[in-house]
Image (cartoon, rainbow, N blue to C red):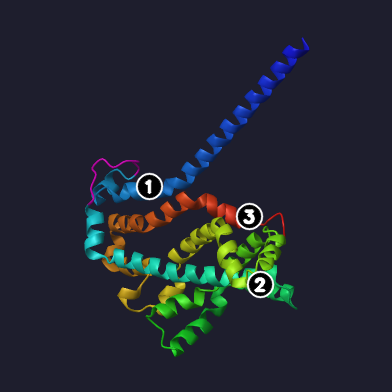
Amino acid sequence: MAANELILSKNRARTNKIIRETLGYVIKIAIGLLFMIPIFVMMSWSLRPDAELVKYGASLLPHKWTFEYYAWCFQNLNLFRYIINSFIQYAFVFAGHVVFSIMAAYAFVFCDFKGKGLVFGMILAAQAIPGEVTIIANYMTVQRLKWIDTWFGLCLPSVVSGMSIFMMRQHFLTIPKEMKEASEIDGCGDIRFMIRILAPLSVPSLASLAIYDFIHVYNSWLWPLLVTNKDRMRTVQVGLAMAMTGEVYDEYGRVLAASTVVIIPTLLIFIVGQEYLIRGLVSGSVKG
């Protein structure tokens, strides 16, 4: 009798667990679909002619499919150039974040010096200052250096980030100090330890940093708007905003088609790497 009751109890617990997990997945899928509705509507409306938008504005799928707006975008807008410029800016910014954040985080975790806590606190405090507060000073500096419409002016003000330093520091705090001591016994210096040991161990955190940087750089607008005047130097957000003016602004199909092309890289990066992004943001949340 007791054995039967134990089996029934285990079965009930297993059934309740399956129900909870299934319910959790259903809720997550429902929330995900809810957030995807605007993107789905944008793509759907970009695939139908303007006449159908007026006549069947509330329909989910087009009655008549057309790709004429996408063809117009690639023929009349410099979208590929804008997207490439954003990727180039991202490459410079991410490379700077990797180099400076690893070195700074290494100093904060594995080195002892006076004022270490104060310096790190100042970095965190600087993160609380809105970027709009310093943008005028940065622009004046770039202008005096004659870096307007150059990659230096577009990228250099962003190559050091307090957020990236914080992320890497939190990750380094999870690495045992005994590993550093063992490397010193084997004659491994600081640079070699960072390159040969810390860097391979930091791949998940660097992957999350790469995704975070891409979303931030790809969607940046104000700074690229200030330092780029020539069309060949404009990033994707600025180029798209400049192109979607005048008569084109009222052509909803063209606007939605261009917006769909622009948003695809961000969606792909986020879908593929969201696990690394979340893992990197919570790295070191227990220790340190």
Residue 172 lies, in percent from the top left, at 65, 62
Q: Which mark is residue 107?
A: 2
Q: Which mark is residue 282?
A: 3
Q: Nearer the viewer, residue 150 or 208?
A: 208
User: Pointer 1: residues within 10 angstroms few (<14), some, or many (20+)?
Assistant: some
Image: magenta residue range:
58-67
Q: Amino acid at mark 2?
A: Ala
- Residue sitting at x 38%, y 77%: 228
Residue 115 lies, in percent from the top left, at 74, 77
Q: Nearer the viewer, residue 56 or 219?
A: 219
User: Pointer 3: residues within 10 angstroms few (<14), some, or many (20+)?
Assistant: few
Q: Which mark is residue 41?
A: 1
- Distance of label 2 from label 1 (alpha carbons): 49 Å
Tell me if I can see residue 237 in this picture.
no
Q: Is residue 182 above or below residue 228?
A: above
Residue 25 lies, in percent from the top left, at 55, 36
- Residue sitting at x 46%, y 66%: 217
Does dot 1 land on a helix, a strand or a loop? helix
Q: Nearer the viewer, mark 2 or mark 1?
A: 2
Looking at marks 2 and 1 on the same chain, the residue that comes earlier in the sequence is marked by 1
Q: Is residue 123 above or below residue 27?
A: below
- Residue sitting at x 68%, y 64%: 180
Residue 216 lies, in percent from the top left, at 49, 64
- Cβ atoms under marks 2 and 1 closer than 8 Å: no
Looking at marks 2 and 3 on the same chain, the residue that comes earlier in the sequence is marked by 2
Does dot 3 land on a helix, a strand or a loop? loop
User: Pointer 2: residues within 10 angstroms few (<14), some, or many (20+)?
Assistant: some
Q: Nearer the viewer, residue 261 or 66?
A: 261
Q: Nearer the viewer, mark 2 or mark 3?
A: 2
- 151 sits to left or right of 185: left
